[in-house]
Image (cartoon, coloured by chain):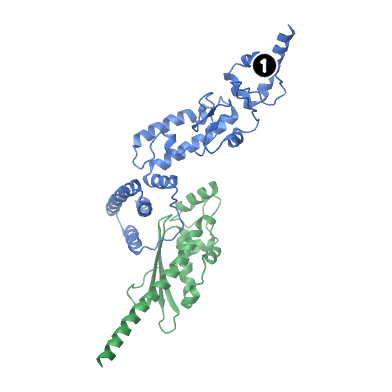
Chain colours: A blue, B green
Amino acid sequence: MNRTKKLVASISTFLTRRTSHPSSSSTLRFNPLATFATNPQTNLTRESLQPPPSPAKPLTILPFSGRAFCSESCDKRSSSVCWNCGFSSEKAAFLFCHSCRSIQPVDDSVDYFQIFGLEKKYELDGGSLEGKYKDWQKKLHPDLVHNKSQKERDYAAEQSAKVTEACRTLTKRLSRAMYLMKLNGKNVNEEETVTDPTLLMEMMELREAIAEADDSKELNQIQSQVQEKLKQWSDSFADAFESERFDEAVNCIRRMTYYEKACEEIVKKL
Amino acid sequence: MMLRQAAKNALGLTSRQSTPWSVGIFRSYHENVIDHYDNPRNVGSFDKNDPSIGTGLVGAPACGDVMKLQIKVDEKTGQIVDARFKTFGCGSAIASSSVATEWVKGKAMEEVLTIKNTEIAKHLSLPPVKLHCSMLAEDAIKAAVKDYKEKRVKTNGAAAVAAAGETAQA
């Protein structure tokens, strides 16, 4: 009788305590009674009350942000530990914990290709990217997560931003190329000055032609020429990248940057 | 990081407007930059093949800018008597090259090689994200001087060969 009273008292304290701590509101999912049945003598003076699902892995859940928690337990193998239920996974869990489905903080080891489930290569099917992007936003959009805790909403906002950034980077050829190079450890965006006379002369003449072009017909003509060059160099990049001729790839990217800039100027004029 | 992005976006948008940005943007162009943009000095070209002209052609890979700076040198004194520039790029790049043409005029070639990008940047109050524009201007000056010197070597070399030929024949 006494024991039951104690149990009920513990549960009511637990309930009141839980409502005053927003971080633990997502424990709605698992059954507190089950936990207390196994541990009737549980000390309820702990700040946050999230006992682990399996007794084999007791975890001290810390009250502050899950990110700090994750960075403490994250090791170089990019395994992640859920801040909510303590589920640990080998693969970096992007977005949702596999076990309790709570939203995770942004994990920098997940690259943009992984987010969309795409292979790390230059050729891309634009349609599939668009579709997957919309799927992710359905899950992440701030308007749709308002019934979750503040922490999860913040995570959702960050994840949403990352997904948008990823989509933007992968959609455009040039940024996709540069991102691929970056993933392979070759940083393209250097401040080093270009002095190749043939390249610069060509670009100078191109920009002069754009500046002097009077009507839209002429501009459109130039634009289609530039687009063709872009396609040509884009293919060269794909080729160079596949064959791991990285210096050549960098050169292709440089040219593409110049042509893209020229296109921008044309569009502004049109 | 966000500041940089916003400034970059803002500055990238302003190619054709000389009025500073309105609300919501942290940095506006310094009045020196606007001055050089609205009243550009020394825009134009010299004849590349003229032996007294040195041409520096440089580009910035990150933003796709192209900058051409030309100097006219007095062969006897080695002084730069005139300069012209042509730049395709953002306002900061245009202003940097304009300032460069102003500063090289009337100086000796060795002296202009000491012009540092930091001085140009300071004069124009360039934000960190635009420092590479001033670097480009410094590189353009050096490239122009180098081109002139190389041309001189070629013409002198050709003249020396011709003179040697004459003496041999004599």
Q: Which residue: 64% across, 28% down?
A: A61
Q: Residue A136, located in which quarter of the rendered image?
A: top left
Q: B149 or B167, which lies in front?
A: B167
Q: Position of residue B146 (x, y in %)?
A: 41, 72
Percent across and percent down for residue B82 are 42, 75
Spot the residue most to the left. B169
Q: Residue at x 48, y 37 (%)?
A: A110
Report if residue A177 is visible in the image: yes
In the rendered view, tell whether residue B82 sits above or below residue A50. below
Instruction: Pick whichever, B10 or A99, lies toward us.
Output: A99
Question: Disc 1 residue type?
Answer: Asn
- What quarter of the picture does the N terminus of chain A occupy? top right
Q: Residue furthest front?
A: A56
**How many neighbours does mark 1 have within 10 angstroms: few (below 14), some (14-19), or many (20 or more)?**
few
- Write down the quadrant of residue A211 in the picture: bottom left
x and y, in percent, of residue B111 in the image: 50, 76
Q: Nearer the viewer, residue A144 or A2?
A: A2
- Viewed as shown, does residue A1 lie left or right of A167? right
Question: How many numbered marks are there?
Answer: 1
Q: Residue at x 73, y 12 (%)?
A: A6
Residue under circle 1? A39
Residue B16 versus residue B100 in the image, above or below? above
